[in-house]
Amino acid sequence: MAVYQLPQWAALAPALILALTGLVLFLVDSISPRSTDRTLLAGTAAVGALASLGVAVWFTAAGVGTPTIDGGEGVIEVFDGQFVVDQLALYFTIVVTIVTALIVVASYDYLAGHTYQAEYYSLVVLAATGMATVAAANSLVTIFIALELTSLPSYALVAILKDNRGSVEAGLKYFLIGALSSAIFVYGISLVYGATGVLQLDSIAEVIADGGADGFGGLLGLGILMLLGGIAFKTASVPFHFWAPEAYEGAPAPISAFLSSASKAAGFVIAFRVFNVAFPLGEIGSVIGFDWTVAFVVLAIVTMTVGNFAAATQENVKRMLAYSSIGHAGYALIGLAGLSADGGELVMGAALMHLLVYGFMNTGAFLFVALAEHWGVGRTFEDYNGLSSQAPVACTAMAVFLFSLAGIPPFGGFFSKYFLFTGALEAATANAAMLAVAAALVVNSALSLYYYSRLVKALWIEDPPATRDRLGQPTGLYAAIVVAAVMTIVILPGFGPVAEAATGAAEALVN
């Protein structure tokens, strides 16, 4: 019996489903522009995100993108190699769609009474489309286009609360700094192209290996540094982190969760693919005069340290989580800092595991802040005093998120940090500087427990104010928070498949 062969572009189905969902939302809005049917709009966006997640999981389970299948034919190249669907692309698509689904469900209650409902959900889904496309992009041009598809809706989402001065101001600052980072990134692309004459990542590596970039080491090195600067902005890494606290504080809390989890993951997938595929460590050092892992060692230590020390000084809960997310960017950077010419699959895999677990625990923490904003309880630690007496389920979930972010067992964050630590120690055999990275990871995790436990103390130990009104239980926000908390706990005993998928994606990319 004949078997119908799907066209190659069907491998991009997760991203295409998200794009189609965005168009459907635009269509609904054009037919009934004054409609505020939250159930229809949020339901459409949630179904699209879950359908994309289901296809990505199906592809992963079926072995799509696995190099060992059919003698290496498992990796699918689309449009002459401009996109590749491999384990890394599918892994990050899963992360993005999980976060998107949680954000959409939580926004159902958060946006009650908001004027621009259809626009909001359309922009969220389009930004997720850009993130899923970034995960599969294999050319500096397609990476930049997908990155802009991610960034432009994000600017509008931060400023979508038009009656809120803080939201509008945060959106403007985010846009201006984002435009500067895009200019730096695209100028870096032009310098790399000038030195190599190609834009596709594997072609850049071939030119470098064949000596085609010899004599252009300075030009290529400057281009790589500018690419690193653009990526550092997207991942909120020091010294390009200063936009994050402002944007996260002013944005609607679900959007803060979206940017700090899904958008950060998109920035890391660019870093992982570009630096592993285009600039292989075995050859790049002789051309530009240094190994780029040195930059990531410094970046990882400084980012996690600045993020955690700044978080420890905050009184505003949302800003504390914003600086905390900067610290976690430093943890993920260990995945690139620990690479060597001989490999580094374990530490890269650990970074991938951490980003998946982070998607649940960080998104859940910001959604709890969204719930607090919905209740109108205030923004400081003191305002959260005694909330557990009125909302024990939500506060239990928040305690799970905070202890997991700190790396306390038996939550998912413990295992991901444990693997990062052991991966850093293993990488220290090839690079002694990784011992400093491992030490910084331990010290900063201990520091983070201080400010996370401050919030737990406020929720569960401090006495509530006598004037607080009775708190409602919005269905969408509660559902998203509880699901994120359950996954943060369940993912620890079920860490085997997660670790296998992350390590497999890392091995395929590094090798």
Image (spheres, grey):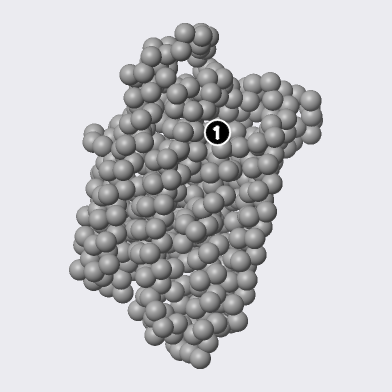
In the picture, measured across the screen, residue 24 lies left or right of residue 102, that is right
Q: Nearer the viewer, residue 500 or 9?
A: 500
Task: Indicate whether 58 appears above or below 207.
Answer: above
Q: Nearer the viewer, residue 491 or 317?
A: 317
Q: What is the quadrant of the C terminus in the image?
A: bottom left
Tell me residue 15's x, y (percent). Answer: 56, 48
In the picture, measured across the screen, residue 476 lies left or right of residue 390, that is right
Tell me residue 160's x, y (percent). Answer: 68, 36
**Residue in the picture at 50% in, 66% down:** 228
**Residue in the picture at 55% in, 69% down:** 226
**The residue under label 1 is which amino acid type?**
Pro
Q: Which residue is mark 1?
A: 254
Q: Residues within 10 Å of mark 1 (few under 14, many from 20)?
A: many
**Residue in the picture at 29% in, 52% down:** 441
Q: Considering the numbered disc 1 on the image, is that residue within a helix, a strand or a loop?
A: helix
Tell me residue 500's x, y (percent). Answer: 28, 50
Q: Which corner quadrant of the image does residue 109 belong to? A: top right
**Residue in the picture at 54% in, 51% down:** 242
Task: Indicate whether 49 appears above or below 180.
Answer: above
